[in-house]
Amino acid sequence: MSNRMVSRACATAFAAGGVAVATLTGGAAVANAQPAPPTSTTMTCGSANPLFWAPRFTWTVTASSGESLPPGGAGLEPAILLSGNNELPAPPGGLIPSIGLNWYGSRVLVDWTNTTTGASGHSVSDEAAWQQKPGIPINRTWTGTGAVSFTVTVETGAGWWFVNTQRAVCTGTISVVPGR
């Protein structure tokens, strides 16, 4: 064999060995990496009814990655956005049912930790009152981007959230991603 052929054979073997090592170590890194949490999750949590004559019920809360405008902010910032509903019966249409006895108030508390950045915080939603079919009030939870673990506490009261307050607690983790 000539020196040229030996050099090519060595270079080929060295390159093949490098590719094999890169593949094996890259594969190990991928196998050990934790997958990112989803950008949305739906949770259910039960609550006693603040109206003593009414039964327990369940909240369904969806937390999604999104953006919201902070107070005095110049632009949208990454946030957890909440929506949801419950299994309380919807009142029938018309004027007379609106005189009924089943009135609720609600608000939402969110405690969060961004496990990517180490930041944490607490947010309180707007408050809703005198609703026959309460929902999740507008909530703004600015967390920054990354994996965020959170606890959502839905406070439901009789007429207002603070009268005989009953709490439903849900927990979850989502990825908050920058807007598109």
Image (spheres, rainbow, N blue to C red):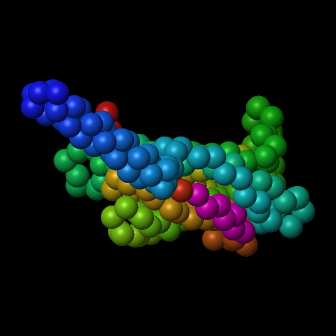
User: On the rendered image, what quadrant is the C terminus found in?
Assistant: top left
* One can see residue 180 in this view: yes
> Where 65 falls versus 164 (above or below)?
above
Residue drawn at point x = 76 percent, y = 32 percent: 94
Q: Residue 57 in the image: x percent, y percent?
A: 81, 55
**Residue located at (11% from left, 27% from top):** 2
What is the x, y in percent for residue 61? 63, 50
Quarter of the figure with the N terminus: top left
Residue 1, placed above or below residue 174: above
What range is drawn magenta here?
A: 166-172
**In magenta segment, residue 158:** no
Counting every numbered tag in the picture gives 0
Q: Is residue 79 visible?
A: no
Farthest-out residue, front = 1
Q: Nearer the viewer, residue 92 or 145?
A: 145
Left or right: residue 76 versus residue 126 is left
Front one among 165 and 116? 116
Residue sitting at x 23%, y 52%: 73
Q: Is residue 28 left or right of residue 159?
A: left
Predominant secondary structure in magenta? strand
Q: Residue furthest left?
A: 3
Q: Nearer the viewer, residue 22 or 29?
A: 22
Residue 62 is situated, as x and y percent measured from the top left of the image, at 59, 46
Residue at the image position 66 percent from the left and 65 percent from the top: 169
Left-right relation of 95 to 1:
right
